[in-house]
Structure formats: structure tokens, C-alpha cells
Amino acid sequence: MTTETFDWRPVPGTEFSDILFDTFEGIARITINRPHVHNAFRPETLEEIMVALQKARLDPEVGAVILCGAGTEAFCSGGDQKIRGEDGGYKDTTGVNHLNALDLQRMIRTLPMPVVAMVAGWAIGGGNVLHLVCDLTIAADNARFGQTGPRVGSFDGGFGAGLMARTVGLKKAKEIWFLCRQYDAKEALEMGLVNTVVPLAELELETVAWCREMLVLSPTALRVLKAGFNADTDGLSGIQELAGNATALYYMTAEGQEGRNAFNEKRKPDFARYPRRP
Ligand SMILES: CC(C)(COP(=O)(O)OP(=O)(O)OC[C@H]1O[C@@H](n2cnc3c(N)ncnc32)[C@H](O)[C@@H]1OP(=O)(O)O)[C@@H](O)C(=O)NCCC(=O)NCCSC(=O)c1cc(O)c2ccccc2c1O
């Protein structure tokens, strides 16, 4: 086995309580750091992940994101049941209830670069959905997956159900949700829930290797492909995301710039110079 250590550097100017945020070679790594509850998330955890994702998005050096959990026992065990309130969500420290896991799911899907879940140990409940909405999942051989919603009085009928069905097939998705069973890494691979399974000791090495492979490819191609993969599932907002990429590319053309220039120069635009391609 190759041993390589990675020089992860904390991102300056960021102070988080529930996550770690560092970068290395164009990869941003976000670690859920609540191992005492198997990395269950609370509203603040999710808020911090979203702040880190936005920072990664705005950093021109970053081309891929790894999402993982602290330690080797859990990727994430979903919403923290100890702070789940009676008022429709998970209580933050000021007493306000949130279901902001749903905001994070959408943000991961619209982040214009690959997000790779690096899963060691438990990926349960909202933690299973969290890696599901990531673009790729690299699992360690100790990973275990499953939903608990119907057992603990919850359900995610959005991406948790619909994207699960598109990923593993409708019958399997219903089995996962209706029976609340747990599945080991090999079973997860067989059903298409993860991309690969590696020995725990090689998890980070493999995940970084996948990121490095993507980092040398065309960022625009990956970006538009990601939007394309998500477009039909996400309906009109998926088309919005895909079309936004078309607009951004159009803005880079002389044809697009002619419209802007004509307006600013107070003249009629001359689009005759630009061909109607077959
Ligand atoms: C993950 C487990 C199967 C692991 O079992 P194991 O026996 O190995 O470990 P313990 O059970 O002893 O756990 C160790 C320690 O961690 C605490 N802990 C674990 N998970 C959580 C959790 N989710 N919340 C709070 N605390 C947790 C556990 O209590 C122990 O600490 P002690 O101090 O008590 O010793 C097993 O732990 C397990 O089944 N965990 C619960 C998994 C679960 O039900 N998660 C929530 C599902 S619902 C959800 O995640 C969810 C979130 C959302 O934000 C939604 C938003 C919108 C729609 C739906 C949502 C949704 O469904």
C-alpha cells in the first residue's frame, strides 16, 4: 500500500465550532467534527458547512470538495436527536427550529464542482442522504448505510426518497426506507449507492486520488455535466442551473458582448456578424 500524507491547511479566517475546513492541492475538505454523537448534525453544523462550501466556491484554486466525518466510526448519523424540538425541526442554540439539511442538500447539488463524500463508518438517516446528494461516494470497508426515519419519527420524502430511487432503483429505495435495515459497504456498492469501497486505511488516499483525476480535467465540462445530471431531477430549478451555465458561456462570446457593447455605446446591436450555426 502506498503511504502518502497530505498537507491539509486550515483555511485562514474561518472559525467553526462543528466542522473543520482545510484545503490541499485545490481540494477543499469539510469534516463534520462531532464524533461524540457519531457526527450527527445540528442546525449550526449545517450552517457552517454551507459557509465553507460558499468559500470553496469563491476560491479560484478549489476544484473539488471532500465531505467527511471526524474519526473512523462515522461519516454522519443524521440529525441530532438530542436537540430535535417539538416545533417542526432541530433547535439551534437560540431555540429556533430548522430543517436546514434540505438547504444544504440543494447547495451541494448546485455547487459548480464535484463534491465527494468520503465515508468511514456510519452513514445513517440524514447522514445517508447527505452522501447520496454528493456527486461521488468513496466508502471504507467499515462503512454502514441505512435510513432510520420511520423508526425515529422522521422521513425525507424529497431527495432522500426520490434521489435514492433514481440511484438504487425504486424497489430497493422502498426497501431501504420501509424496513430501516442497515447495509454494509459491499451491499452499498452492489446497489449503486457508492462508487467504490476501499480498506479504511486507504480511504483518504483513494479519495484524494479521485479528486486529483478530476482536477486535471476541464472544470467547465465537469460543471456543466453536473448541472446536466441534476437537471431533470431538479425540475425547473435544475434547468435554471443548466441554463445559467449556458448564459455564463454566452457572456464570454463576442456575440453576447456585442449586445452589451451596443447598449453601452447607445447604438443598435449588429448581430449580423455572428453566424446561425447548424
Ligand atoms: C448510528 C447508530 C446506528 C450507531 O449505533 P452504535 O451502537 O454504534 O452507537 P450509539 O448508538 O451508542 O451512538 C454513540 C453515541 O452517539 C449518539 N448518537 C448517535 N446518533 C445520534 C443522533 N443522530 N443524534 C444524537 N445522538 C446520536 C448516541 O446517543 C451515543 O451517545 P450517548 O451519549 O447516548 O452514549 C445509532 O447511533 C443510531 O441509530 N443513531 C441514530 C440515527 C438516526 O436516527 N438519525 C436521525 C434520522 S432523522 C434525520 O437524520 C433527518 C435529519 C434532517 O435534518 C431532516 C430534514 C428534513 C427531513 C428529514 C430529516 C431527517 O430525517
Image (spheres, helix red, strand yellow):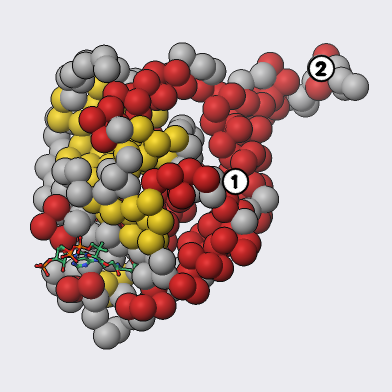
Residue 94: x %, y % from top left: 15, 72
Residue located at (36% from left, 78% from top): 151
| Label 2 crowd bin: few (<14), some (14–19), many (20+), radius 10 Å | few
Q: Residue 135 in the image: x percent, y percent?
A: 48, 40
The answer to which quarter of the image holds residue 182 is bottom left
The image quadrant of residue 88 is bottom left
Ligand 1 found in image quarter? bottom left
Please state which amino acid type lies under the numbered disc 2.
Tyr
Q: Nearer the viewer, residue 215 or 137?
A: 137
Position of residue 96 in the picture relative to residue 215 (left or right):
left
Q: Determine which of the numbered discs, if any, sits on residue 102 in the image.
A: none
- Dot 2 or dot 1: first in sequence order is 1
Q: Which residue is mark 1?
A: 230
**261 versus 179 height, above or below:** above
Residue at the outermost bottom position: 86
Residue at left offset 21%, top offset 55%: 39
| Disc marking residue 274 | 2
Q: Nearer the viewer, residue 107 or 83?
A: 83
Q: Residue at x 83, y 14 (%)?
A: 273
User: Horizontally, is 194 left or right of 4 in the view?
Assistant: right
Residue type at tag 1: Asn
Identify the secondary structure beneath mark 1.
helix
